Image (cartoon, rainbow, N blue to C red):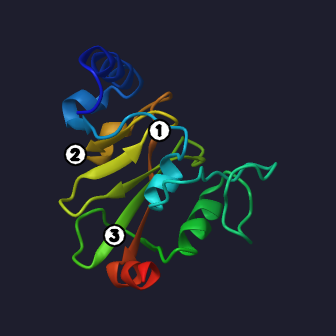
Amino acid sequence: MVGNNAWNAYTREHLEQQYPNLASEGYTITSPDTIDYNCVAWAAEAEDEWWWPDAMGQEYWPEGIPREETLSAFTAAFSTIGYEVCDDASIEPGFLEIAIYGDAQKVPRHVARQLTNGEWTSKIGQYEDIRHKTLEALSGEAPAYGTVIQLMRKSAAKLSSTES
């Protein structure tokens, strides 16, 4: 855990109020809070920009992808970095996976990225990064993120080729 004990206690209390499943599903705070990036950027492995399809164009969003809060826009945005739709959240050797959460109207609210051990990592808005054991940890009625509305995966080979 990061930070001092009083701040960690406050942070944990806040997280568990916003996301009631976190405590029972298991999680760890893995970084201090920052406004440098959000959950979408974190899932895309970008820590230097805030990804969001805001209509004013103030935040980063892949060129040519509609600036709208729709599942199709989020799917298209992640397609620009090699992700494709998949149906299973289990670990697949050779693939990286993300989960897009949405509300009852399927409006995207959050994106989590799977770690190699099968757990998930999320950036909670402008707050901390966390590691959570299940996708259900962040599910639930607002202010939680809703439910997983789309899974996507990317070949780890595509990751290696984009990093070189």
Which element carries disc 1, helix, strand or loop? Answer: loop
Q: Where is residue 77 in the image (x, y as percent from the top left)?
A: 60, 66
Label 1 vs 2, first from the N-terminus: 2
Q: Mark 2 points at which residue?
A: 133
Residue 60 appears left or right of 161? right
Other residues around mark 2 within 10 Å, as few (<14) / some (14–19) / many (≥20): many
**Depth check, front residue: 30 or 18:** 30
Q: Mark 1 points at which residue?
A: 145
Q: Nearer the viewer, mark 1 or mark 3?
A: 3
Q: Alpha-carbon distance for marks 1 and 2?
A: 16 Å
Q: Position of residue 101 (x, y in %)?
A: 47, 48
**Depth check, front residue: 39 or 7:** 7
Report the disc number at residue 96.
3
Q: Which amino acid does label 1 sit on?
A: Tyr
Q: Looking at the rendering, which quadrant does residue 66 occupy?
A: bottom right
Other residues around mark 1 within 10 Å, as few (<14) / some (14–19) / many (≥20): many
Q: Which amino acid does label 2 sit on?
A: Lys
**Depth check, front residue: 147 or 159:** 159
Which element carries disc 2, helix, strand or loop? Answer: loop
Q: Where is residue 91 in the image (x, y as percent from the top left)?
A: 22, 67
Q: Which of marks 1 and 2 is in front?
A: 2
Q: Position of residue 48 (x, y in %)?
A: 54, 54
For the point 54% across and 67% down, the residue is: 78
For the point 27% across and 59% down, the residue is: 115
